[in-house]
Image (tube, grey):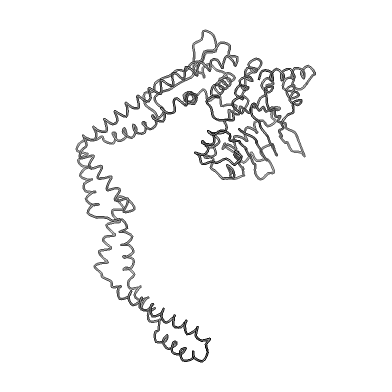
């Protein structure tokens, strides 16, 4: 779960630190106090877009840090699969520094890409933003939700379908490439034979080009090499060296300190003699033959011409040769091979049909179960007379997820037929439908932390009370962080935080703090009574909090 959030120099926030707890964490505050900045900071830390304009005026950078605890073996295994290791105390620190020209994201002090950051954080936290419920209007989202609900049953079949679908597409593509008339195939076969023969006749060998290139370079510069070595040989004067040895030998008996010099001269003489022999041997072996030079040149020209046609290296040319042999075999046995591919495609289609049918049956069964739970959940959320179903249609083609298209249909009035969500549900109703989904999915969802940004949009009164009950239900198995304006929801808080905006030293500042029990009553009274908080409003707030505590 999310243990702590720190924000520095982000928009109106100079510094804010939240120590969050398990269960239901509620954030409240006046309109414009900066509640959206808090959720926005979490989004940015998770890899969302971060504009340089978000940096607090006068600051060089903005900084966001999230401290997670990783408690379950499943989470640890999932992170291990991504090569992420929590600290010894089971925590994971995710941070992001936003600079005017770039941003830097880190996981436990290791810099990571935004894509990798999103991959890791998707295992830890799920944010339901103010407008996320609008995604319910997209039909493709509905099948995704169902598959999440029934993942233990559908995922094995989806993996089979995905693998078979790749094979199916490859076979279809190969069959499509085998079109064309017999005359065209004969021309292609003749050309393939010509290309194969030209490569085979070249008898290419690995490493040959490098060896010939070295010999060609040596022979190309043979004259310059010989001139340089001749000059060096003449400069190494053996007679002068011999005189130096004799001279030192004659005087060495007069002073023992001369012996090291004599020994060095002996060593130099020996080295010089070896060097002269090496130069002489090289010059004797360096015989330039015009015929050999031309043969090497022609061989290199042949290799380079083949590389220009079939690949930049000898290995690539030889690989192209194998491909052309396979293609020629295919052309020479065209009817037989096409028949084999057609048969393989038929078998693949049958397997895909079987797998997709099995998956569809599982989905339809799970869809009825999900729809029933959704109906119960919506009734709990004050949909007085509601019917919720999931309709399935078969696509006219296969996909990597099977052949199903599914859609949620709803009726909120007695006697009215079920219709697509976009034709029936208002903004407030969509928000409650999404909350009902989150509640139903809570048992199968392994993500430990859920954030709801103003889930109360468009609701009030008894409906708000029902929504608070649902959030409390979810918070029993997940950590829930919720921004709200409604006292009915705020009263359910296990941890209540207040976001306030004020002016300090001529600058607007947003701060956040956890409320004590007595302060919680005052905040509930503010949500209930607005500008004027009377004793009656305070008493109402106390009663609301007591009622919420008893209902947990």
497, 443: nearer the viewer: 443
65, 60: nearer the viewer: 65
Above or below: residue 235 compared with residue 477:
below
Is any part of residue 105 visible from this angle?
no
User: Could you say where residue 479 lies in the image, as x and y percent from the top left?
Assistant: 61, 28
User: Could you say where residue 370 lies in the image, as x and y percent from the top left?
Assistant: 50, 19
Q: Residue furthest right?
A: 535
135, 203: nearer the viewer: 203
Q: Quadrant of residue 335?
A: top left
Query: In which quadrant is the C terminus drawn?
Result: top right
In this rendering, position of residue 3 left or right of residue 211: right
Is any part of residue 544 visible from this angle?
yes
Query: In which quadrant is the N terminus drawn?
Result: top right
User: Could you say where residue 193 lies in the image, as x and y percent from the top left?
Assistant: 21, 46
Above or below: residue 224 compared with residue 103:
below
Q: Residue furthest top?
A: 415
């Amino acid at each position: 779960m999310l243990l702590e959030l720190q924000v520095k120099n982000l928009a109106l926030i100079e510094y804010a630190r939240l120590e969050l707890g398990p269960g239901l964490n509620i954030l409240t505050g006046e309109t414009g106090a900066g509640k959206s900045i808090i959720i926005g900071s979490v989004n940015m830390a998770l890899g969302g877009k971060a504009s340089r304009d978000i940096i607090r005026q006068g600051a060089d950078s903005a900084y966001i840090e999230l401290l997670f605890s990783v408690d379950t073996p499943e989470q640890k295994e999932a992170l291990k699969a991504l090569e992420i290791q929590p600290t010894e105390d089971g925590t994971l620190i995710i941070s992001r520094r936003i600079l005017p020209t770039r941003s830097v994201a880190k996981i436990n002090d290791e810099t990571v890409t935004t894509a990798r950051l999103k991959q890791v954080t998707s295992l830890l936290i799920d944010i339901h933003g103010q407008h996320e419920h609008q995604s319910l209007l997209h039909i493709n989202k509905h099948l995704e939700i169902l598959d999440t609900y029934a993942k233990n049953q559908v995922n094995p079949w989806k993996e089979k379908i995905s693998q078979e679908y790749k094979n199916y597409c490859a076979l279809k593509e190969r069959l499509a490439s085998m079109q064309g008339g017999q005359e065209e195939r004969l021309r292609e076969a003749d050309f393939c034979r010509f290309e194969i023969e030209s490569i085979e006749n070249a008898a290419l060998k690995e490493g040959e080009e490098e060896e010939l290139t070295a010999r060609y370079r040596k022979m190309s510069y043979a004259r310059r090499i010989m001139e340089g070595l001749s000059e060096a040989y003449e400069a190494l004067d053996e007679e002068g060296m011999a005189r130096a040895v004799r001279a030192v030998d004659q005087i060495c008996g007069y002073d023992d300190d001369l012996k090291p010099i004599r020994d060095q001269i002996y060593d130099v003489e020996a080295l010089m003699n070896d060097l002269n022999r090496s130069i002489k041997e090289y010059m004797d072996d360096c015989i330039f033959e015009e015929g050999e030079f031309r043969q090497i040149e022609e061989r290199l020209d042949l290799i380079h011409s083949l590389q220009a046609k079939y690949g930049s290296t000898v290995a690539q040319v030889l690989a192209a040769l194998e491909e052309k042999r396979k293609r020629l075999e295919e052309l020479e046995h065209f009817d037989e091979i096409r028949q084999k591919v057609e048969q393989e495609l038929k078998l693949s289609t049958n397997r895909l049909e079987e797998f997709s049918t099995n998956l569809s049956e599982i989905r339809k069964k799970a869809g009825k179960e999900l729809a029933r739970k959704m109906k119960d959940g919506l009734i709990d959320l004050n949909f007085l007379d509601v019917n919720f179903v999931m309709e399935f249609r078969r696509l006219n083609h296969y996909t990597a997820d099977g052949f199903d298209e599914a859609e949620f249909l709803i009726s909120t009035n007695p006697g009215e037929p079920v219709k697509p969500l976009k034709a029936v549900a208002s903004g407030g109703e969509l928000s409650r439908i999404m909350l009902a989904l989150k509640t139903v999915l809570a048992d199968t969802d392994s993500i430990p932390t859920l954030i709801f940004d103003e889930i109360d949009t468009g609701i009030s009164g008894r409906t708000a009370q029902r929504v608070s009950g649902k959030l409390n239900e979810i918070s029993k198995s997940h950590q829930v962080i919720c921004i709200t304006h409604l006292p009915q929801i705020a009263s359910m808080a296990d941890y209540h935080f207040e976001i306030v905006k004020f002016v300090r030293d001529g600058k607007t500042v947003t701060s956040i703090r956890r409320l004590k029990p007595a302060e919680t009553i005052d905040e509930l009274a503010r949500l209930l009574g607005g500008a004027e908080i009377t004793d009656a409003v305070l008493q109402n707030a106390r009663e609301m909090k007591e009622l919420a505590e008893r209902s947990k």
